[in-house]
Amino acid sequence: MAETHGDDTRREEASGVTSDYEPSEEDTATFGSVTSSINEHVWEYGRRYHAYRCRRYPIPNDEEEYKRESLRHLMLKDLLGGRLYLAPIGNNPQKIIDLGTGFGDWAIEVGEAFPSARVTGVDLSPIQPHWIPPNVEFIVDDIEDEWAHANDYDFAHFRFVNTMLRDNTAVLRKVFQNLKPGGWVEVQDIVPRLSCDDNTVTPDHPLIKFFSMVKPVLREKYGFEIRVLDTLPILLQNLGFVNVHRKIFHMPLGEWARDPHLRLLGGYFREIMIGFVGAMAVRPLVEAGYEKDEISDVVRAVTEAVGNRRLHGYLPIHFVWAQKPPT
């Protein structure tokens, strides 16, 4: 296994149900059994969520979340100098799957980059655009279900998904089974652990407090494996993957870095984290029993702290990629 490190790098009743996609008799499932509810949304706490298995995932899927996810996509591309992945998948992959695709930006751009490849994005929400490249398709389903009719992929991609899965071992075993020999998997995700190198971030930092509030909720209420990245390379090796690599970037939180590129990335990341805190402060913390005033106070404090250039905090973003043995 090779590993490298980069440098600074809360229920109101649902007020309505909406549908983005009209169901048809031709709707089929690639992974498991789905129903027409996959096309619906519910509104809670002033935010929109997917209706299909609506308690499965705590993040909204509305316009506000779209803006945050789009900015995150831009940030990661900028981080990688325009690249969309680090795995050495070659110049002619023919079958690519984006697991937990969200709004689909990554899948669409990969489809444009490889017009001869078939690119499939899978997510719980029907929030992807209708106008997409002809070689790209989106499926609404749960990647933690049993997979059916899904095999022979050259490349399987996850981005900010694995820390919100209940059983990474099971999902990654399915990936291994459905990759072609020699195919690759890549995981891109963040570890919610604020650090610094100069003692400007103290244990009473509002984001550290926020993480201490939300982590137990994600583990106990949702069953998420939020610490999976710490042991992900070993997990991949145990599943049979080879050529396991990990690269860690310390992403600056805010525009405090001297380097102009890092300062730009830090500005992106500040806005992304403010949006993430706002999203997590709604359904998860409210339903965990936190009072509205307490939630508002911590959100306000986080917003102020991440704009303070005297606090030189960063969070690690992990890129982990591995190969199914060629033979």
Image (cartoon, grey):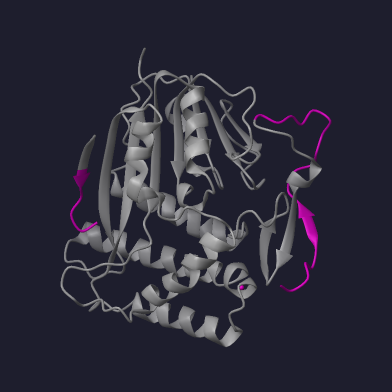
Instruction: Kindly report the secondary structure that dominates the magenta region of the rendered protein.
Output: loop
Let me know if residue 109 appears in the view.
yes
Q: How many marks?
A: 0
Q: Is residue 301 above or below residue 186?
A: below
Q: Point out residue 193 in the picture as x, y percentages from the top left corner.
A: 34, 64
Picture residue at 55% right of the left edge, 62% below the top: 220
Q: Which residues are magenta?
A: 4-30
Picture residue at 59% right of the left edge, 24% below the top: 150
Let me know if residue 111 appears in the view.
no
128 or 273, which lies in front? 273
Residue 141 is inside the magenta segment: no
Quarter holding the C terminus is top left
170 or 54, which lies in front? 170
Q: Is residue 248 above or below residue 155?
A: below
Query: Is 9 left, or right, of 32 in this rendering?
Result: left
Q: Is residue 198 above or below residue 65?
A: below
Q: Point out residue 326 in the picture as x, y percentages from the top left corner.
A: 35, 15
Q: Point out residue 26 in the picture as x, y percentages from the top left corner.
A: 79, 28
Q: Quadrant of residue 142?
A: top right
Query: Is 85 left, or right, of 16 in this rendering?
Result: left
Picture residue at 79% right of the left edge, 68% below the top: 15
Q: Point out residue 94 in the picture as x, y percentages from the top left corner.
A: 47, 19
